[in-house]
Amino acid sequence: MYIVTGGAGFIGSNLLSMLKMSTQENILVVDNLEDGTKFSNIVEASISDYMDQDEFLYQVQTDSQFLSKVKCVFHLGACSDTTEWDGRYMMRNNFTYSKILLEACLEKNIRFIYASSAAVYGSSLNFREDVKNENPLNIYGYSKLLFDQYVRNIKLNNKQQVVGLRYFNVYGPKEKHKGNMASVAHHFNQQIINHETANLFKGSHGYGDGEQMRDFIYVEDVCKVNLWFSQHSNISGIYNLGTGRPNSFNSVAGAIIDWHGKGKINYIDFPDNLSDAYQSYTSADLEQFRKTGCDIDFLDIKEGINQYLTEVSG
């Protein structure tokens, strides 16, 4: 059996679709469907079972046989709202929950592949997986960093696998439910559809209008990497997961306008409340990732946008 926490979410539901095509294993989805609209992400997935995240954690803590048939846990469940400042809530969801689940998996030698985040780097301009480069700007980034640090201190035996993937800016289908936290690709696309105008931030932090740069990676590529690690159980570690090729917001909006064959860009004032907690530039250093032997090619921004919009418009 495989378990996907956050399985009704953005990355989790895309991973489910890929898992169903690559394995005959039963799949348990764990999530919080308080937002019932997320059901649409998994309605076609033909999952074996579903559990609420709280019930799942209770079973993990109280039933020693609960995980006995599990081969791999993809731990994608988290609070991913980078504007959330309730530290107790964030740490309970992203750190404590993860720690309990990890310890249970280690006890039974269950492969554990989890979602970290490029948010751990914060204001740093060096995106190599090194403590000296980690300087989160918000409690979300700190919660992810603290769990990474916890993982780093674990000494694994040769039967255990723990992989942390530091996602950069992921975009693609099944992210609509994320609202404000959906990718800029999603927001720009909706703006072009509704008003034929994509709203980008004016220049900030030394960058020109719309020239802030992020490392955008298509969700299908992210899922391929998750599966690759699950098939290489001898490899553990914490790795960046981006393309290594940053693109400006202008480039993203331009690719969307090109796909629609219409639209324009409008520049709006940069919000004051984001000025001290905003990453204007990210670019994954992939040296350590490529040393694992994973040679998956990642779509460039034009290819990814075209595939994304073709799928969601179908």
Image (cartoon, rainbow, N blue to C red):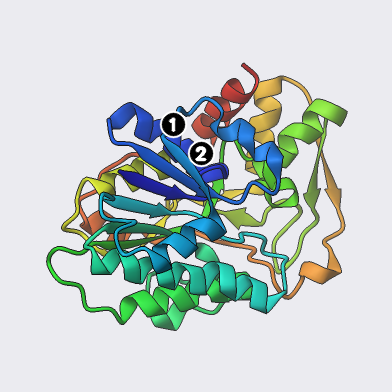
Nearer the observer, 148 or 134: 148
Circle 1 sits on which residue? 17
Quarter of the C terminus within the rendering: top right
- The answer to whether marks 1 and 2 mark residues whose Cβ atoms lie closer than 8 Å is yes
Quadrant of res 279: bottom right
Q: At numbered mark 1, what does the secondary structure look like: helix, strand or loop?
A: helix
In the image, what residue occupies the spot 45% across and 39% down? 49
Q: Relative to 222, is 187 on the left or the right?
A: right
In the image, what residue occupies the spot 38% across and 48% down? 3
Q: Is residue 154 above or below residue 79?
A: below
Circle 2 sits on which residue? 13
Quarter of the N terminus within the rendering: top left
Q: Is residue 270 above or below residue 69?
A: below
Q: Is residue 47 above or below residue 102?
A: above
- Horizontal and vertical percent for residue 295? 25, 44
Task: Specify few, some or many for label 1: CA neighbours under 10 Å numbering under 14, 14-19, or 20 or more.
Answer: some
Q: Relative to 150, is 270 on the left or the right?
A: right
Q: Is residue 125 above or below residue 307?
A: below
| Residue 96 in view here | yes
- Horizontal and vertical percent for residue 288? 28, 63
User: In whole angstroms, how far apart are the C-alphas of marks 1 and 2?
Assistant: 7 Å
In the image, what residue occupies the spot 31% across and 43% down? 227
Residue 69, label in figure: none
Amino acid under label 1? Answer: Ser
- Horizontal and vertical percent for residue 184? 68, 45
Q: Relative to 5, is 212 on the left or the right?
A: right
Nearer the observer, 66 or 137: 66
Task: Specify few, some or many for label 2: CA neighbours under 10 Å numbering under 14, 14-19, or 20 or more.
Answer: many
Q: Relative to 279, is 275 on the left or the right?
A: right
Q: At numbered mark 2, what does the secondary structure look like: helix, strand or loop?
A: helix
